[in-house]
Image: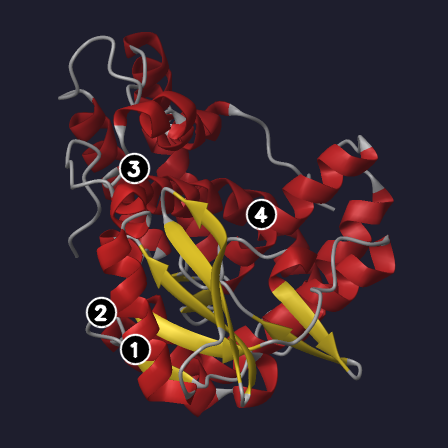
Amino acid sequence: MTYADITVRLPSASERWAGDAFRAELRRWVAEAVGDPRVLEVRKTRPWATVWRAETDGGVFYAKQNCAAQSYEAAVVSTLNDLAARHVVPLTAADPGRGFFLTPDLGEPLGDGEVDDWCRVVAAGAQLQLEVARYAGRLVGSGLSVLAPAECQVYVEHQLDTFARLPGGDPRALPPDRRDAVRALLPQVGRWAEEVAALGLPLTLCHNDLHGGNVFDLGGELRFFDFADALVMEPLAALLIPLNLLAHRLEAGPDDERLRRVADAALEVWSEHASMTDLRAALPAALQLARLARVESWVRCTAAMSEPELAEWGDAAAYWLGSLTHPPVVSAA
């Protein structure tokens, strides 16, 4: 498997999105899909993606294009609509070749509410994972990278070597002392991988940015979106972001029962594959390996950043790689 390379530089995506040529191209595509938009306005632009609101006679829609290294999202959303439509946002139109896709206006996302809301989000996310696990090959065919537990130690070695090629002072760099600390942890990465692999869970979709801001509640049914950061991994990796965000919000330590409650809501979905005892015991190791998914997505995103954007966001991949030395967000039960 080929992984993202932190040394790669591509033309700035955000600079292209700000230009008249892109607006004209997007308008033509939206017009072909749903009719000429009366209003076409940028809603959000980040170095990694742009989202536009299109108001037409047929309704309001949102158009998205990701940076080149994550442009597969259009194909992934198409595939998920085929495999598990009740769990994902409906797709109005897609052009996987250009990475364009269009979804209807579904109102405001669920948002990050109380612990009960987080339980709903992770449980529904795990149910989506369970339903698409048998089709992991189709997700890979749509463009998602695979990072199985058995590959994690080699992945860390690869990224350490790649980061070492960056020149001194580069905003993307991982300082030598932090590289040394992560390299010393390689045997532990191998042990984490063995512990997680022993659960025997299938490889499946890992959203890699799972929280209430990326899900709609439609009449009590949760619909997920924003799959640009996704990979195919073991399923417990998807819990890193929700548990990490909730721990910060609640100022909760790794033994906090509120975090365990949220984790259990997802683990229950997998309890026919492994016992709850084993799932809880292996969760800390899975959460550590999940940090590598964040490394991979941030490395992809930095490729098309401008120099000012690198100054703001460029150290994100290095942070997540270095965070392997941090304690797990949730301890073993």
* Dot 4 and dot 2 residues touching (CB under 8 Å): no
Whole-number angstrom distance, CA of label 4 to CA of label 2:
31 Å
> In what element is the residue under mark 2?
loop
Q: Quadrant of residue 251?
A: top right
> In the image, what residue occupies the spot 64% across and 67% down?
215
Pointer 3 or 4: first along the chain: 4
Pointer 1 or 2: first along the chain: 1
Q: Which residue is mark 2?
A: 98
Q: Is disc 2 surrounded by few (<14), some (14 to 19) or many (20+) residues within 10 Å? A: few
Q: Which residue is mark 4?
A: 240
In the displayed structure, does residue 22 sit left or right of residue 245? left
* Dot 1 and dot 4 residues touching (CB under 8 Å): no
Q: Is residue 137 visible?
A: yes
Pointer 1 or 3: first along the chain: 1
Q: Which mark is residue 29?
A: 1
> In the image, what residue occupies the spot 25% across and 9% down?
169
- Pick whichever, 143 or 302, lies toward us: 302
- Going by the numbered disc 1, the residue's amino acid type is Trp
Q: Which mark is residue 302?
A: 3
Q: Viewer-nearest of labels 1 and 4? A: 1
Say if 250 sits above or below 3 in the image. above
